[in-house]
Every structure is written in structure tokens, then in C-alpha cells.
Image: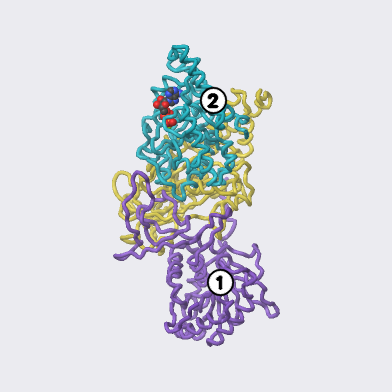
Chain colours: A purple, B cyan, C yellow
């Protein structure tokens, strides 16, 4: 009698990864604080008016390359992560939506998706979302960071990203040992060309006075989360996250701003929120945080299945889209502000 | 259990007493680790007679564990010591291991970086998984080492471990005052502990005192020749006791009193019964005092709140 | 690093995503979880959730095994090469933790070494695309690289997988999900392994050789297999480490302690029962994991006779238990 080898498969959970709908282009048309809406429509009107011609140009170019049916969507991000005022003073969702749609109409286009920055820290899938349908997106992205190895790093030392900082190079040594204090040395960018542009990014801070020190995420990290959502690259245990929510016909907006989902779909026939390419048209003061976000994206280890899924989808389009293999290569920015307009306050 | 050994001044006998105390616990069957946290001048290697750690090791000592993130060496004294007493330990039925975590030769004090308290807590947790008792020999006075362990022991992951403090001092007016200052002073242990999240009351309840190299008037009769001298010494001893009582360092908080021993005065080492009965170079009272001190470490009634 | 001529004979098929690995290195640490009670299945899963959003994998039979998502650590260092030759290793090391039956914690660091795909260090995202792969610049002989790794000491002169596996243990043991109470005082056992990887003829099975070093609680394993065998080899080393730890704990810690306790009239029952109830059921050779694992395990058993030794120790523990039950110690 011969023994029969029975092979036994231990994998309990198949590596199932959900796909998300993808368009060709996602255009971010602006970013404002929630408090800005309390002052009415002045800021957003100005921003959308400035964006209009660039949006038109981007639309034209995308249609030219990928056909008349290229899927293009627009979005607007409201920074409500650390609101300064009381909850009661916050504008209501219906008020904000009104202001946004009216301003967009005036500028001559539509805004398809309204997003919350707090919804990038923790994804709220639905209005009145409870802990069950939330995903800690900022925690997830922070957990995907793999610091670039300095020359000589052999694994002995723990990564410093655990301390809440990520850099694109080697820091100037600062550990002071009483007996042998090191000579000062400059920081150095990894892979620099002659000279360094060294960037050190604060990912989060901790309120040390609070016992339950909770991470306060930086706008750099939250912006990285935002851009990754727009590229359709984030998953929570394989599930899609922060899927846009469309309020039904008879369904009113919630009363409180925090009860709004992460992403609200404003137009019924919008192209997908996430896209092969994401363009942000923003005033120049966002430049530093966006640069930081891009560095963060460049230090993430992505789920191979998600990357492959996206690349395959793109290749299978009627007009095949070839994606660069680094996700940051799918992000574009246009920093612009009319110089002749003084908008001081 | 974690025992932190500290003193206000150097040369009090903290290391010699601590090493002997650790040895007695190992004899009784416990697995004991001795951690040389006297980063500036590690001497435990010399007391345990471990040649490669005489003045600290070349690499992978506790200093580099913190500053260079290397693993910390664990030297089993039964294998690494030249002392017969320590080499014979495994041959004594039921005895535990006595392991030295040495300092580094070119150590020196270092300032505490943000990740060190967590790393220190990690070390204590790891040792607690393996050893019944860890004796941590701290440097004298308010050093970074003291700050480091205060910060580490305030962390929640060490809350389940028993941490106790022994403050070593000589039996003189100045030394009693200094030891008192180390615990109760403005920059003392309790204040520093409170700043790091310790409850000062509880912390104070975990502090006991060890008097070292105390002249024993009954034993040292040769050196006390004149009656007047004896009378004066007895009276002064009484005065010191009163001073200690007043400073909350009296009998109730006395973990041990180690007699002055001429042999230890000259040779910092671990002694055992053979040094007393065989060669008769050490005093029986000294060994007994180490034994009593070792027993006190786990005498729960003695450590209950006062 | 270039494959030696004998290894080239198989004509390694190079997939388009990079060169085939020539060597696999790893280190496994095994210890008891610092918690008074064993962890429930859900507590084990929560403890292993080291990366939010990445799934923890869990198997319930024959023993409950919960594995954390892989952690990624970047490295760029010189290799510690035995005899002659130099090499620079650039890439990422993977590490994960395993909880078995809510009692035993293992920390594993592992890596696959390939020849470099460029003459210099490349952009970081290139290495991020192949987690767990280290590219070797220079052309040291793989055998020298392997011997160098296996004989490196602390502090590591080359790749420090020891620190990485130690760190993952330290981090898990520090978790606020544990009560940090030591249920039984035991050491941490270390297994360091290296595998020569080369495409094998279809019928060939991976092979194994094990050495106990003079450092206490330290074993060295050498393996052979094809590049696809790497996950199997990693698992084999973890299973070996777990069983080796069980045997050492029972034989060198529990039995001698109980014997002294009895001699000194102290109660040894707690640790005897711990061994019988908590440790003995974990002896579960992984032969159900397929013919290759079975072959590896049996090759190991035929040399070490671990199962028989463990059986003998548990029998001794039962004897001691019965002895104590009949004549309880005076101080009991
Ligand atoms: N019980 C004792 N009797 C006599 N001398 C002692 C005694 N204990 C320690 N000494 C001596 O005191 C000196 C300092 O001891 P040591 O343990 O190194 O002190 P510390 O660690 O406090 O600096 C040593 O030279 C030692 O010989
Ligand atoms: Mg000393």
C-alpha cells in the first residue's frame, strides 16, 4: 500500500480585494476651511472662477486623448479636521452644499463630489456613520509607510517614522552623547543630484497633556490620504473605503456637519470619483503640504493586487491607458492665484 | 521583581552589597539578572570577577543597548567569572542562575532621547519573562539613569511588575542627610517620579534603606580599645539612629545593615560561607547581613504601606 | 552576487519582475506571551493587528495560529561575508509575529537575496515594489554570503535580522492588550536559518540540516530548496523553533525546577500543570502541511528524535505530578 499525501491548505481568507470605479481624470477644484463657509460664498466664488479655464483645458485635453466619452469628475475638499469654533456655529451641510453648487453654477461648471478632510482621517461611509462603518484611513496610510534606508542601515535601529516624522534623506546627526558629541554634519537628500532638497515631514503630533494621547494628523498626511482616495488605491482589509454617498430623493442632509459622510456625491450622473489621473488646481500656499503628501506617497508599500487591478483596468480601456508604475506619477498640481486680486482677511 | 539600587554618593558600597544580595537570591534558587546601569563607571564586572567585563565590555553593554540599539550581552557568571564561588553556583542543588548585563567600557552618561524609556521598559519586560529578580545598579546621585528608569517604570506596561528601591548609604551624619535629600529633596526621587507620572506616596512606599559598612561595636573589639572610646561610639550611634528616625529612614524602613568588613574594604567581591568558615577571611556577620537583606526583598509584610 | 556554476545548470527562469532569489535568510524568536491567562481567539487576532487595514490570518486547527501582517524594514548595508568577497545589500526585510494557542509568541524576520538589477542604488520605490527582497551589489560567492550571515554575532556586522525579529517581539509584548504578567519564567529561543535556493528537478524535495550552537538557546538551520519553496521553508523554521522551545522549556526549566521544589519542600504543581495543560497540547508536528513539509520534518526527526524526547519529558512530568498528589509538600 502506498501512502497518500493529502495536501492541506491553511489559508482561511482568500486575498480578496475589492475594485473601485475609475474615471480618466479627477479634478480637485479647491479646498477651503469649513469656517470659510460661515462667511458666505466670497472665497469659494473666487476660487471656482479662477479654476474654470484650467478645468476646461484639462477636460479638452483628456477628451482629446481618451475620446469624447472620457470620464471626468470634479470635487471640492472642505477642511474640517480641526475646526476652531463650536459645533453649533458650524454651517449646516445643506447650507454648504447650496453655496458650493451656486458658486459652481456661476463659474460655469458642476462639482460632482464634496469631500471632508476629517473623512480622510477616518472614513465615514454613510451619514450618521457609527464605529461599525468607519475606517481609520490615516492610521492605515501611516502604517504603510516604509522609511527609505540610509546607507549603513542594517536593521539594528528602529525606523524613525514611528516617532511621527518622515524625511526624504538622512538627517543631521543630533544624538548627544556626553563623552563623544559628534561634529555637525548637514542633512542629505537620498539620491540627490549635486545638492540636496532635504524635507522632514511631521506626520502627526501627540497631545502629551492628554492621557489617551491620540494622534493629531498633519495636513500633509491627510492630503496623502485624500490623493490616494482620488487614485482609488486605499483599501481596508481588502474592502473599498469612503465610497461616495448619494443622498436619495426624499432623504434630507443631516443637521450637523460631522454627520455628513466622507464624500457626498452632488450630481446624479457624475463620472467615478476616483480616476487614473488626479489634478489639483489650488492656490500656491498648498504647495508645501502637497509636496509633502507626494513624498509620503512615494514611501508607501501598496497592495500588489490593487496596483495590478488598476493597471489592468487602465490597459483594458477602449483607448488603452498606460499608467506609470509609481502612483505619485498619477498626481498633477496646478498652483495658481490671480495676482491682481487682493483677497485679504 | 525589579530592585533599583541607588545612592546619593559614590563609594557607599551599593555595588558590593547589591552583587552579594543578588548572589544570595540565586543561591536560594532564583534566576537573577544584575544590570549595571552605572553607565559612567561600571564596576559590577569587577565585583563578579568577570575579566571580560572588568571595567565594562567592549561592545553590546547596556550603554550601547540604549545609544547604539545593539542587543545587550548576558554573561552567565557561572561561565564567565573567575570566582570559585560563582563558578560553583550551578553545582549547588536547586540554585538559580546569576547573569550579568554589563555596562560598556567607554560608556559615559548620555541624555535621554524620546525612544529610550520605551526601550528601557522593553528590556525590563524581557528580563521579567526570564528572571525572577532583576537588580538594577544605578549610578550615584540624580543621574540620567535614574530619570530613565523612573520614566520607564511609570509606563503602563510595567505597572504589573513589582518595582522596589533600595537607597544605600554609609552610617554617618552627612551620608544620612545626603540619602534623605536623594529621596525627598527638591530634585529628589519622589519629585522626579511625580513629574513622570508616579504617585509620590506609592513611590515612597517602595523605597527602603540599606546602611553599609557600619562599624559593629560588638564585633570590632580590637579597634575599640579604650572604654571612653566605646562609650562615645555607642552614644553617637544612638544619635545617628535618632536622626534617621526623624528623617523617616528609621527601623521600619531599614532593609539591611551591612557590617564593616575588612575583607570587603580591600577586595570588592562576592563572598560566601567558605570565606567565613574555611579561610576565615570574612566575617560571619557580613554573610548573614547579605542573607537577611536578600530575604527582605520578598518579605511582603516589610514592604506593605507604612 | 552571482550564482555559482553548479547552480546555473538548471538555467533559472528569470521572471519579468526581477531576478530569482539565490538565498533566503531568516531568524525566528520564540517565547511565552506575557499574560497571565492564555489569549482568546479574538484577543490573539487583535494583538496581531500590527498594521491597521491589513488582514490578520488565522487558522484554528490543529493548533490555533494567528499571524500578523508582514512589516517592512528598509536596509542598505554591507553583508558579513565569510572568507572572501564583499557585497552591499539594498532592499527590504519582512517580519511578522505569530501567536500559537494564545500562549506562544514568535517573531520572524526573513528576506530573499537576489543579484542587483542595477550597478548602483535605485530609487526607493523600486525596492518598495518587491517587499522582502534584497538586491546584492557586488559578486560575493553565495556560499560565503550564507556562512557569513549564519556566523555573524551581536552587534551584527551585516544584515541584522536578529534585531528586527527581536523588535517585533518587544513591540507585541509591550502592547496594552496584555497584562504583562509572566505566567512561567522561561527564556527566548533563537533559530537562525539560511536556505540555498535554486530551481530543482520536479521530484526533488527540499532538504535540511540543523546545528545547535554553543550559545544557549540558539540553533542554526541550513536548507536547500527551489525559490518557490521559500514560504514553506520559513514555515518549517517557525515550526521547528516552536517545538524546540517547547522541548527546552519542559526539559530544562519545568522538570529541573519541579525536582528542586520537591527536594526543598516547595509546591511545584503550578508549573507542572502549566506544562501538561498549556504546553503539551502544542506538540503538533506540521506534517499535515503537505509532502514537502512532511519530508523536511521527518528528516529533522530522524536526527533529533524530538518527539520521543518530548514524550519522555511529559511522562516525567506526569510522574512528578502524581508523586506530588500522593505526598503533597509540607509547605503546600
Ligand atoms: N561592608 C563593607 N565593609 C567594608 N568596606 C566596604 C563594604 N562594602 C563596600 N566596601 C568598600 O567600599 C568601597 C565602595 O564600594 P562600592 O560597592 O564600589 O560602592 P558604590 O557602588 O556605592 O560606589 C569599595 O572599595 C569597597 O571595598
Ligand atoms: Mg558602584
- Which chain is indicated by disc 1? A
Residue A109 is situated, as x and y percent measured from the top left of the image, at 54, 85
Task: Tell me if residue A8 can be seen.
Answer: yes
- For the N terminus of chain C, the image quarter is bottom left
Residue A10 is situated, as x and y percent measured from the top left of the image, at 57, 53
**Badge 2 is on which residue?**
B241
Badge 2 crowding class, 10 Å Cα cut-off, few under 14, some 14 to 19, many 20 or more, is some
Rendered image quadrant of residue B11:
top left
Q: Is residue C38 above or below residue B282?
A: below
Pointers 1 and 2 in contact (C-beta within 8 Å):
no
Q: On the rendering, which quadrant does ligand 2 occupy?
A: top left
**Badge 1 is on which residue?**
A20
**Residue B260 or residue C259, whichever sits in front:** B260
Q: Which mark is residue A217?
A: none
- Which chain is indicated by disc 2? B
Q: Residue furthest right?
A: A250
Q: Is residue A115 above or below residue C304?
A: below
A272 relative to C133 in the view: left or right: right
Give the Cα distance between marks 1 and 2. 80 Å
- For the C terminus of chain C, the image quarter is top right
**Residue B76 or residue A232, whichever sits in front:** B76
Same chain for the residues under marks 1 and 2 in the image:
no
Residue A127 is situated, as x and y percent measured from the top left of the image, at 65, 71
Report helix, strand or loop for mark 2: helix
Report helix, strand or loop for mark 1: loop
Rendered image quadrant of residue B145:
top left
Rendered image quadrant of residue C268:
top right
Amino acid at each position: 500500500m502506498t501512502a497518500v499525501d493529502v495536501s492541506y491548505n491553511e489559508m482561511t481568507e482568500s486575498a480578496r480585494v475589492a475594485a473601485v470605479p475609475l474615471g480618466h481624470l479627477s479634478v480637485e477644484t479647491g479646498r477651503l476651511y469649513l469656517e470659510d463657509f460661515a462667511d458666505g460664498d466670497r472665497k469659494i466664488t473666487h476660487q471656482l472662477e479662477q479654476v474654470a479655464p484650467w478645468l476646461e483645458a484639462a477636460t479638452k485635453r483628456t477628451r482629446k486623448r481618451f475620446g469624447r466619452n472620457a470620464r471626468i469628475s470634479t470635487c471640492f475638499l472642505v477642511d474640517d479636521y480641526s475646526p476652531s469654533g463650536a459645533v453649533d456655529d458650524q454651517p449646516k451641510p445643506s447650507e454648504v452644499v447650496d453655496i458650493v453648487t451656486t458658486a459652481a453654477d456661476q463659474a460655469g461648471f458642476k462639482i460632482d463630489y464634496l469631500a471632508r478632510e476629517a473623512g480622510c482621517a477616518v472614513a465615514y461611509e454613510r451619514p450618521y456613520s457609527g464605529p461599525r462603518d468607519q475606517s481609520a484611513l490615516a492610521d492605515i496610510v501611516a502604517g504603510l509607510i516604509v522609511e527609505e534606508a540610509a546607507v549603513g542601515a542594517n536593521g539594528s535601529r528602529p525606523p524613525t517614522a514611528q516617532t511621527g516624522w518622515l524625511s526624504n534623506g538622512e538627517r543631521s546627526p543630533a544624538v548627544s552623547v556626553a563623552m563623544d558629541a559628534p561634529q555637525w554634519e548637514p542633512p542629505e537628500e537620498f539620491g540627490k543630484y549635486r545638492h540636496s532638497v532635504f524635507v522632514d515631514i511631521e506626520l502627526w503630533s501627540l497631545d502629551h497633556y492628554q492621557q489617551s494621547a491620540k494622534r493629531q494628523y498633519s495636513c500633509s498626511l491627510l492630503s496623502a490620504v485624500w490623493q490616494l482616495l482620488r487614485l482609488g488605491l486605499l483599501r481596508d482589509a481588502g474592502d473599498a473605503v469612503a465610497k461616495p454617498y448619494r443622498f436619495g430623493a426624499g432623504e434630507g442632509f443631516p443637521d450637523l456637519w460631522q454627520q455628513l459622510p466622507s464624500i457626498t456625491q452632488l450630481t446624479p450622473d457624475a463620472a467615478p470619483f476616483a480616476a487614473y489621473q488626479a489634478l489639483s488646481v489650488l492656490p500656491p500656499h498648498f504647495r508645501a503640504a502637497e509636496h509633502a503628501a507626494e513624498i509620503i506617497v512615494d514611501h508607501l508599500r501598496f497592495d500588489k493586487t490593487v496596483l495590478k487591478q488598476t493597471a489592468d483596468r487602465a490597459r483594458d480601456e477602449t483607448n488603452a491607458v498606460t499608467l506609470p508604475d509609481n502612483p505619485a506619477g498619477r498626481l498633477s498640481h496646478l498652483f495658481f492665484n490671480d495676482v491682481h486680486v487682493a483677497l485679504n482677511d | 521583581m525589579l530592585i533599583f539600587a541607588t545612592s546619593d554618593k559614590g563609594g557607599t558600597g551599593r555595588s558590593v552589597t547589591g552583587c552579594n544580595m543578588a548572589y544570595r537570591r540565586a543561591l536560594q534558587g532564583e534566576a537573577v539578572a544584575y544590570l549595571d546601569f552605572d553607565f559612567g563607571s561600571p564596576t559590577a564586572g569587577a565585583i563578579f570577577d568577570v575579566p571580560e567585563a572588568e571595567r565594562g565590555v567592549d561592545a553590546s553593554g547596556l550603554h550601547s543597548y540604549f545609544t547604539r540599539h545593539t542587543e545587550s550581552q548576558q554573561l552567565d557568571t557561572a561561565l564567565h567569572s573567575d570566582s570559585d564561588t560563582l563558578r560553583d553556583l550551578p553545582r549547588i542543588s536547586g540554585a538559580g542562575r546569576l547573569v550579568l548585563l554589563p555596562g560598556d567600557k567607554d560608556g559615559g552618561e548620555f541624555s535621554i532621547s524620546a525612544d529610550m524609556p520605551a526601550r528601557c521598559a522593553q528590556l525590563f519586560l524581557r528580563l521579567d519573562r526570564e528572571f525572577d529578580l532583576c537588580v538594577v545598579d544605578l549610578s550615584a546621585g540624580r543621574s540620567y539613569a535614574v530619570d530613565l528608569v523612573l520614566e520607564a517604570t511609570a509606563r503602563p506596561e510595567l505597572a504589573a511588575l513589582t518595582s522596589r528601591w533600595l537607597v544605600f548609604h554609609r552610617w554617618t551624619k552627612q551620608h544620612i542627610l545626603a540619602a534623605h535629600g536623594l529621596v525627598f529633596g527638591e530634585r529628589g526621587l519622589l519629585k522626579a517620579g511625580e513629574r513622570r507620572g508616579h504617585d509620590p506616596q506609592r513611590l515612597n512606599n517602595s523605597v527602603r534603606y540599606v546602611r553599609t559598612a557600619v562599624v559593629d561595636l560588638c564585633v570590632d573589639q580590637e579597634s575599640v580599645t579604650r572604654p571612653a572610646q566605646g562609650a562615645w561610639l555607642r552614644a553617637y550611634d544612638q544619635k545617628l539612629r535618632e536622626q534617621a528616625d526623624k528623617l523617616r529612614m528609621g527601623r521600619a524602613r531599614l532593609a539591611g545593615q551591612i557590617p564593616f568588613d575588612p575583607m570587603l574594604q580591600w577586595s570588592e567581591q562576592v563572598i560566601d560561607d567558605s570565606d567565613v568558615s574555611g579561610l576565615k577571611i570574612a566575617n560571619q556577620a557580613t554573610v548573614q547581613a547579605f542573607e537577611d537583606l536578600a530575604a527582605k526583598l520578598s518579605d511582603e509584610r516589610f514592604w506593605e504601606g507604612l | 552576487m552571482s550564482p555559482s556554476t553548479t547552480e546555473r545548470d538548471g538555467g533559472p527562469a528569470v521572471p519579468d519582475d526581477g531576478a530569482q532569489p539565490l538565498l533566503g535568510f531568516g531568524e525566528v524568536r520564540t517565547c511565552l506571551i506575557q499574560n497571565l491567562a492564555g489569549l482568546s481567539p479574538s484577543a490573539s487576532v487583535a494583538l496581531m493587528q500590527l498594521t491597521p487595514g491589513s488582514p490578520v490570518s488565522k487558522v484554528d486547527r490543529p493548533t490555533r495560529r494567528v499571524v500578523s501582517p508582514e512589516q517592512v524594514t528598509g536596509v542598505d548595508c554591507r553583508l558579513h561575508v565569510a572568507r572572501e568577497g564583499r557585497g552591499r545589500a539594498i532592499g527590504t526585510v519582512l517580519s511578522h509575529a505569530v501567536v500559537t494557542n494564545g500562549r506562544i509568541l514568535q517573531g520572524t524576520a526573513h528576506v530573499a537575496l537576489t543579484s542587483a538589477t542595477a550597478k548602483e542604488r535605485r530609487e526607493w520605490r523600486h525596492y518598495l515594489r518587491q517587499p522582502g527582497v534584497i538586491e546584492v551589489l557586488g559578486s560575493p560567492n553565495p556560499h560565503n554570503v550564507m556562512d557569513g550571515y549564519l556566523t555573524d554575532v551581536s552587534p551584527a556586522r551585516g544584515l541584522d535580522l536578529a534585531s528586527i525579529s527581536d523588535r517585533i517581539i518587544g513591540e507585541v509584548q509591550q502592547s496594552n492588550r496584555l497584562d504583562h504578567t509572566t505566567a512561567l519564567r522561561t527564556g527566548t529561543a533563537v533559530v537562525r536559518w539560511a536556505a540555498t535556493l535554486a530551481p530543482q528537478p520536479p521530484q526533488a524535495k527540499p532538504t535540511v540540516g540543523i546545528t545547535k550552537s554553543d550559545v544557549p538557546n540558539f540553533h542554526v538551520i541550513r536548507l536547500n530548496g527551489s525559490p518557490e519553496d521559500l514560504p514553506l521553508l520559513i514555515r518549517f523554521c517557525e515550526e521547528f523553533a516552536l517545538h524546540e522551545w517547547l522541548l527546552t522549556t519542559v526539559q530544562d526549566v519545568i522538570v529541573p525546577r519541579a525536582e528542586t521544589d520537591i527536594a526543598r519542600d516547595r509546591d511545584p504543581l503550578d508549573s507542572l500543570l502549566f506544562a501538561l495543560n498549556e504546553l503539551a497540547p502544542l506538540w503538533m508536528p506540521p506534517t499535515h502541511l503537505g509532502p514537502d513539509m512532511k519530508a523536511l520534518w521527518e528528516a529533522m526527526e530522524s536526527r533529533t528524535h524530538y518527539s520521543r524526547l518530548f514524550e519522555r519529558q511529559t511522562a516525567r512530568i506526569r510522574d512528578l505530578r502524581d508523586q506530588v498528589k500522593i505526598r503533597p509538600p509540607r509547605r503546600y
